[in-house]
Amino acid sequence: MKTFFNILQKIINLKKHIYPDDIFELFLDNDIYSEYNKEYVIIRVLINLMYHKNKKANIQNYYLKNAKIKFSSLNSFINNSFFSKELKEQILNIFSKAQKTYYAFSKFAHLYRFKKYPIVVDTDLTLNTIEENNRNTFILLQNKSKYLFKIHDLVNIIENAIGNAPEFFSEPLWPKNPYNNQKFNMSTLYNIYFKMKSCDRLLSQLFHFFFLENFIVNKFTENYEIFIRENAIKKFVFNSPYTTLYLSTINMLKSNKFTRRLEINIDFPKEKLVEIFRPFLYYYYIINYGFKETEKFFNYKEILNNKLKNFYSYNKNFGRKIVKLTTYFGKVIKIERLFNTNHIGFHELYSPNIKSQIIYFNYINIVDTNNYTDNQNNNEINFNEDNNDADNDADNDADNDADADADADDAADNYADDDADNDADADDAADNYADDDADNDADADDADDNDADDDADDDDADNESDDDDETIMDNDTDSIS
């Protein structure tokens, strides 16, 4: 601010340049009375006003504070009704020349630093060498030193700071230089943002929102808290190791009425399970840790339920252990223990569009309640019909309804006749079936009688053979004696 005061006094050719410590110094300065000029007086008052506003200001941002003090002090003179139009124009011209000169010196100082400061860091965060003249390289000036960054690394550093959300509660931090832990100033953030827009990379949404709030952390937190939390959830789900997400994955599967039926073996690879369900887990975390009772909350809840249902329907044996035996000539020579991992990816699973369904069903209800005429089939509605035509259409509709009712009655009678004929045929079939059963029973009785006679004959034959055997044995006995 002192440089700007000196430039103002140099432009109006004041012999003695002052930097006031007290507002009463203006009236003790003899230079005003030796060379009286309205411009001198007003510039001196303007300087003192800016000085004391600077002391009382509570704005933390240095550049924003200086800009606000300068232009608010200038407006107090421009809007003063006691000053003539010519004097206001003179003051505005002097202020404009001072601003132009001030920024010219600032630009010159920046170029000097840019050329004279040594390069302290010329590698990225993975120790790869960075080319100073590359279009994706950003040169940061800090502490009379130059730090080379890839624009991608800088954006990640800024996103990690402003997207800070421990336990998913947004607490943005001011971005810092990772090599010296010093905060980026406002001009550096603006230069990084415009450098990012000129490079071949996607624009960071989080950084863009921070830019829209003029890099004011409190306003950014207040207006974009939902986005900060969802961004934190996304990074947590897709960047955390499987050991951190395994229990959450199991809880998600157990909380769904379809996937809770899956019998996942305890030896199923945890890393494989988490990688399969990471996209599902993101929706699960948004539902449980995001903001409730929002449209996105209900949509994500419905989508997750449908996706898990279709996942279960595709393979109900997912996660089970399979023992594969390899045999050779009936001997087991190899035993393999595999797991059923057959599944469809999250993005390939079908999920109905909730909004489209709501719109479609609303349309159907409107059509049903309006009772359009036959012209609805051709999507043409004639609004210029006369009342007579409308009456005729109504009569025709009534006749058609009557014909339809008559046809329906005839169809019902025919259906009843057919039912009666079918019943009669069924009775005849039942009688014939009963007669056949009776004949079969009689045949079965005859067969049983014949079997009984045969058994009796067999018994007689057996007795005769036994008598013959006894006779033979008696003969043998006699011969031995």
Image (cartoon, grey):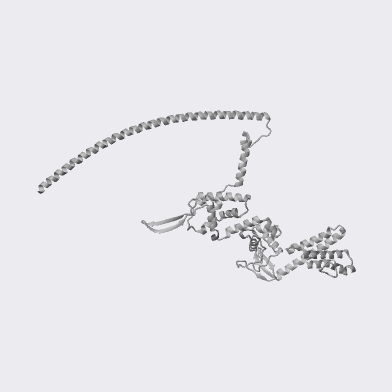
User: Looking at the picture, how far across and down is residue 365, in whole percent?
Assistant: 62, 39
Horizontal side of residue 371 vs 456, given as left or right? right
Side of 378 relative to 214 (left or right): left
Quarter where residue 119 is shown: bottom right
Identify the residue shown where x is 54% and y is 30%. 408
Left or right for 92, reference 127: right
In the image: residue 108, left or right of residue 420: right
* Quarter assignment of residue 43: bottom right
Q: Is residue 124 above or below residue 457?
A: below
In this orientation, which residue lies closer to the viewer: 428 or 193?
Answer: 428
Number of marks present in the image shown: 0
Q: Is residue 394 above or below residue 346?
A: above
Q: Nearer the viewer, residue 176 or 254?
A: 254
| Residue 436 screen position, x and y as percent | 35, 32
Position in image of residue 51 (x %, y %) = 80, 65
The residue lying toward the viewer, choosing from 340 and 45, is 45
Quadrant containing the N terminus in the rendered view: bottom right
Q: Is residue 252 above or below residue 376?
A: below
Residue 23 placement: quadrant: bottom right
Residue 276 visible in rendering: no
Residue 329: image location, x then y, percent: 36, 56
Q: Identify the residue at horizontal 84%, vertical 64% (top origin).
A: 45
Residue 220 appears anywhere in the view: yes
